Amino acid sequence: MAFALRTQRSIFPTLLVLMLCAPAIAFAQAPPAVALRVTGEVPTHLELSLADLAEFPRQTIRVTDDKGVQVEYAGVPIAQILEKAGRRWAKI
């Protein structure tokens, strides 16, 4: 019984601190998470969030795999992302 009382007393200050800090933590805004980094041989390095990627126009393509099954892919073409990073394409 003495052990249980000692444990409860040592936990109380920790719980009190957590209860006092919880409202501040709940309303703190975290910076947008980086979903995609573009680095390397591009003029401008990019860090794009999911919201940034949602602003790009999406494209959907359908292809047939090696088993004859039609598969659909959807997303932002990588060329558009690289162009935003300043990559220019050579004219052929």
Image (cartoon, grey):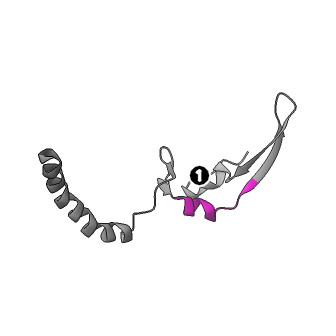
Image side of residue 60 versus residue 20, left or right: right
Q: Amino acid at mark 1?
A: Leu
At 15% across and 53% down in the image, what residue appears? 10
At a point 37% along the width and 68% down the height, the residue shown is 26
On the image, the x and y values in percent for residue 58 come to 71, 58
In the image, farthest residue toward the front: 1
Which residue is outermost to the right? 68
- Establish if 73 lies above or below 18: above
Q: Which residues are magenta?
A: 49-59
Rendered image quadrant of residue 20? bottom left
Looking at the image, which residue sits at the far top?
67
Taking 37 as reference, is 53 above or below it?
below
* Disc 1 target residue: 82
Spot occupied by residue 5 in the image (x, y as percentages of width and height): 15, 52
Task: Examine the rendering and report whether any part of residue 82 can be seen.
Answer: yes
Percent x, y for residue 19?
A: 27, 66
In the rendered structure, the answer to whether residue 42 lies left or right of residue 30 reads right
Q: Is residue 27 magenta?
A: no
Instruction: Using the rendered view, name the quadrant where residue 59 is placed.
Output: bottom right
Residue 87 vs 67, above or below: the answer is: below
Disc 1 residue crowd, few under 14, some 14–19, many 20+, Cα 10 Å: some
Say if the magenta span includes residue 53: yes
Depth order, front residue of 59/19: 19
Residue 53: x, y in percent?
A: 59, 59
Residue 73 in the figure: left or right of residue 13: right
- Return the residue nearer the eye: 18 or 82: 18
Number of callouts in the render? 1
Frontmost residue, 22 versus 64: 22
Q: Quadrant of the C terminus?
A: top right
Regarding residue 44, the answer to whether it shows in the image is no
Q: Residue at x 64, y 49 (%)?
A: 78
